[in-house]
Every structure is written in C-alpha cells, then in structure tokens.
Image (cartoon, rainbow, N blue to C red):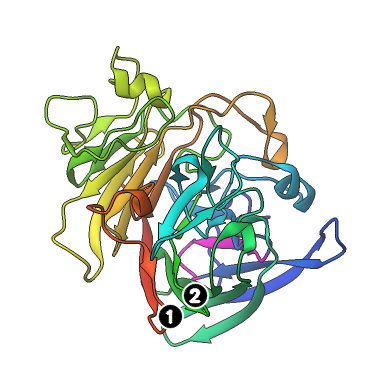
Amino acid sequence: MPTSSRAESQPSLWSQAYGHTKEGKPVNLYTLTNGRGMEVSITNYGSTVVALTVPDRNGDREDVVLGYDRLEDYESGQSFFGGTIGRYANRIAHGKFTIDGRRYVLPKNDGDNSLHGGIKGFHKRVWAAEGISGSSGQALRLTYLSEDEEEGFPGSLSVTVIFSVPDDHNDLRIDYTATTSGKDTILNLTNHSFFNLNGAGSGDILGHRLIVCSNQFTPIDAAQIPTGEFCGVENTPFDFARATAIGERICEDCEQLNFGRGYDHNWVLNRTGPGPLDFAAQAYDPISGRMLEVLTTEPGIQFYSGNFLNATIQGKRGKTYGYRCGFCLETQHFPDSPNHPHFPSTLLKVGECFRSTTVYRFSAA
C-alpha cells in the first residue's frame, strides 16, 4: 500500500496477491507508477481504485482516496469506495424500466429504488486483469462478462475498463468500452472514488474549493430520484461556476440539500453533445495545495459530499472516516435516465459499442 514519501519511482506496473473472496476466488492488487510521484493501486475485485498517491505543493506524497486495507472489508463494506459501478450507476426509480415495451424489474437496494447496479453490482465482482506497458505509460486492462439477467438486466454485456497512468502528467485515465449480445440493455458506468486531497482520513473536505462546469442540475425528490426537470444553478447553493468552498452553503435551509442530506446531485455539464474530453470539474485543497481536475466525455457528473459517512467506518492504516471526510465526482449519464426519455439515452443496442473516457488530473500549487 502506498505511503507518504518524497521519493519518486521509475514508471512501473507490478502485482501482488490480495487474498481470496468468500467463494475462494483469488484476487490481486496492481500498482502503476509514472515516475512523477504518482502511484495508483487497483484491485481486480470490483475493478476498484484502492490507493492513489500524489505529491502536495512541497513534494510530499499522500494517498488521497478513501478505502480499506483488506479485501474482506471491500466484500462486506457498503460505501462503494473506489469501485467501478455498473451496470447502472446511480438510481433507477422503483427498480423498473422498459425496453421496446418489455418491463424489466431489478432488485431494490435503496428503499424502493435500485442503486449502483443492484445487490451485487460490478464493484462486487471479480474481473479478469492484464497489465499493459505502452509508449504513453503504464496501464491495466480489466474485463468482465455480465450474463443476461444478472441483477435483472437484459443482454450479455462484455465490459472493458482500462486504467492508465501516463508519463507526462499525474493523470488517472479511465477508458470504458462495452457491447451487449442477445438483447438490448441499459448502461451507465462510473468510478466511485472518494477523494480527500489533504489525505485520506485527514478530516473533512468542507474547506476544499470546488468548480463545476455546469449551469443546470437535475433536482431530486425525497427518494433522491430526478423529477425530470432541469434547474438553473445561479443564485442557489448549487452554483459552483466560481471556486467555492464545499462547506460554504452546504447547511443552508434548502429543500434539495435536505433531500440529499447535503450535496448528492447530478450536474448537467456544459456541453452540446457527445464528443472529445472536456473539462467538467475542479477541486482544490488550500492546505496541501493539491488540485484535482476532472475531464470527461460524459454528459453529467454526480457531486457527492460524503453525507452518509460516519465514524464507524475504519479505513486504511487504521484511520477513521468521519462525516463528510471525502467527496465524489462521478462522471455519468443522468440518474434514472431510462424512465426520462428527454434525458441523454443510456440504451445500448446489440451491434453498438459504448465508449467513454474520464481523466482525473492531479497537480499542486
């Protein structure tokens, strides 16, 4: 597991045993470095980012993602730390959707709704993994075949996720591809890393300053399901057009903040349609000087302020993860899109190939 250090290493990719699942399947931990002070550890259990170490303004390195030391905790934990989420990230109302007149019913694991792929989503599956060394840096390819009707979803879905760490920037690049056979399906993939740019377990993130490149968000109801509306962010607590501390307005008496117990909403990114990588968000920690920029091809981003974290969660190196001690910037299509035809479509048809890219770029100042 990466620890604090000023030393930089040569670009590398190496693996080590990480244990066995309850069913006896072996799991590994893969570590990628780029020689610029960045080190990323990923396990093929859940295609999960376990650790991500980057330097601060003084060159001191620290792990900035929340997670666990042990595989057993990822199996039993419910916080989605670092996992690849699918088949459908975020919520589907009442666990139901329709394709070509056929109704599909999913397991409900969030009140009356389906959340993050159901009871055993992609973050709870063992993926096949293969290290790749290319001219642009170190990479890890993970693949998973989700069988027809797994967690209620139609179609046999083949998914590939490539994590890469280029030599020229402290970037974690995530490339997703997927195809379905037999039946059309719905798909919404994301990574669910929780960040604290001052270091995982170092306190809350309310002083982090956030920018979101968005003029609108999709408001939710009391069950955290989108109402179908698009609301402007101007003159609301959801306006992050300029760098604003996460904690500055989080406790305002606002119905939307009450529904989410803080920020747990989808922002509509300022883009006209699918296309190349585009700037989505930026977070800056004044204490360490670390900055995170998010670039994506996705139409939306879910900003979650760690509202359900509490001091009962013990993370890496024995640190306790308290209230709002981490935040998520989950690039995505919109929640409950299959039940809102005017949202960007998440339908994946037989013969089509889904492609998506997100980059988490780190620097310090």
Q: CA distance from mark 2 to mark 1?
A: 6 Å
| Residue 133, picture quadrant | bottom right
Identify the residue position indicated by label 2 in the image.
183
Question: Whole-percent x and y of residue 271?
Answer: 16, 58
Q: Is residue 156 magenta?
A: no
Q: Which is nearer the eye, 355 or 44?
A: 355
Q: Residue furthest top?
A: 253
Element type where label 1 sits in the image? loop
| Residue 354, picture quadrant | bottom left
Q: What numbered label is drawn on residue 350?
A: 1
Give the residue drawn at x 52%, y 58%.
86
Q: How many marks?
A: 2
Instruction: Identify the amino acid type marked 2.
Output: Lys
Crowd band around label 1 with a 10 angstrom C-alpha radius: few (<14), some (14–19), many (20+): some
Give the residue drawn at x 16%, y 52%.
270
Element type where label 2 sits in the image? loop
Q: Is residue 35 magenta?
A: yes
Instruction: Identify the amino acid type marked 1.
Output: Val
317 relative to 10 in the view: left or right? right
Question: Whole-percent x and y of residue 248?
Answer: 29, 21
Chain part drawn in magenta? 34-44
Asked if disc 2 and disc 1 are in contact, CB closer than 8 Å, the reply is yes
Give the residue drawn at x 56%, y 32%.
111
